[in-house]
């Protein structure tokens, strides 16, 4: 939802350039959480 707002606001005021670091940080956090969950599932399968 935040990315959609940045895109919509960026079209009007070109603010996406100011918020680009935030977008990148959000994407990195989501990727890190996905990777950690995947590793946790793999670890649980290996130990059963």
Image (cartoon, rainbow, N blue to C red):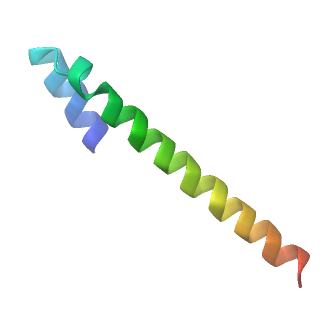
- Side of 37 relative to 18 (left or right): right
Q: Which quarter shows the N terminus?
A: top left
Residue at the limit of the structure toward the bottom, as seen here: 48
Above-or-below relation of 20 to 26? above
Write down the quadrant of residue 15 in the picture.
top left
Q: Residue at x 18, y 26 (%)?
A: 8
> Quick check: 1 above or below 36?
above
Q: On the rendered structure, is 39 left or right of 15?
A: right
Q: Quadrant of the C terminus?
A: bottom right
Q: Residue at x 10, y 17 (%)?
A: 12
Residue 23: x and y, percent? 35, 34
In front of the other: 45 or 21: 21
Identify which residue is drawn at 79% across, 77% down.
Answer: 44
Name the residue located 30 percent from the left edge and 36 percent from the top edge. Answer: 3
**Where does the image place residue 34, in percent across and percent down from the top left?**
59, 55
Q: Seen from this angle, which residue lies furthest left?
A: 13
């Amino acid at each position: 939802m935040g990315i959609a707002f940045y895109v919509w606001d960026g079209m009007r005021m070109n603010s996406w350039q100011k918020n680009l670091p935030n977008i990148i940080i959000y994407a990195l956090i989501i990727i890190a959480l996905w990777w950690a969950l995947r590793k946790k599932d793999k670890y649980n399968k290996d130990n059963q």
